[in-house]
Image (cartoon, grey):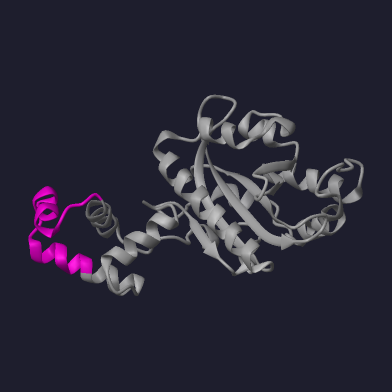
Amino acid sequence: MSRLLSMLKPYSYSIFFDFIESYLPSGFLNINPDDPIMVKLEELMEENDQFFSASDLILMKYLFTSKRSMQILGIAPAELDPGFIMKTIHPDDLHRLVLGREKMYKVAQEIYAAKSGSALMSFTLRFINPEGTYNNLLGQAYFFHSTIPREAVFIIQVVTNLDSSVKTNPDGHWYVGNDVSLFKFPDEKLLQMGSNLSDREFEIIKLVASGLGSKKIADKLCLSVHTVNTHRSNILNKTRKATIADVIFDFKNLGLL
């Protein structure tokens, strides 16, 4: 186990469902900082270098953010907005952030159209911190539909500050799906979720996505066409997709390309 994960104090994310039960009726407004649930949550955030927020994805608005956003992102809770996130993302992660947001809104629209359901989106991205260096942050976003106090798709998002000692998937951790059991305190198994392709296979996928065929990829990587095609076949086997185009489509939706 990495140094950071061993230093954290795991706790049950059921407390976030207690938060939902307490503050959903008010639309996550007028949060009482002296409420025992809030006192405990702020203590947990402080102990584990985390903060959490509640948002309305239909209004595209943060409704509440806990205190530690100041230490992690350098912004006061009441001032956090989507524009700030865009300005502080690592340049190399901007494309993944944009694609991830597109996926986030798509999931929200699907839940809203169904008028029921929940989903989870989990990912790592790098953001600049108040000291001017970049932190690797884990975001865990729990989506759910509600008709209280209005019809909406709300998100409870927990952000954990990871450091370089934490081993994540080489292509960046991600998960999008309906397995809300993964909305839990992070461990190494969770952080390894993502692409299961080798570095070479992922490189080939990127080149195919850029419009190159096997011959040009072979020339660029100093490989034989046969080797490139073997990698492409392995990619299909690992991802259980019928075509490379299907793989690229999924990877783009998940923010990997």
Q: Is residue 182 above or below residue 133?
A: below
Q: Is residue 117 above or below residue 199?
A: below
For the N terminus, give its image quadrant. bottom right
Return the x and y of residue 218 as percentages of the image width and height.
Answer: 11, 55
Number of numbered discs overlaid on the protein picture: 0
> Residue at position x 47%, y 60% from top?
192
Q: Does 211 lie within the magenta span?
A: yes
Residue 201 visible (yes or no): yes
> Residue at position x 92%, y 42% from top?
34
* The furthest residue to the top: 131
Magenta segment = 210-232
- Magenta: main secondary structure equals helix
Left or right: residue 163 versus residue 70 is left
Left or right: residue 89 versus residue 147 is left
Residue 112: quadrant of the picture: bottom right
Return the x and y of residue 211 as percentages of the image width and height.
Answer: 20, 52
Return the x and y of residue 147 as percentages of the image width and height.
Answer: 78, 61
Residue sitting nearer the eye, 78 or 136: 78
Residue 64: quadrant of the picture: top right
Left or right: residue 20 versus residue 250 is right
Residue sitting nearer the eye, 16 or 42: 16
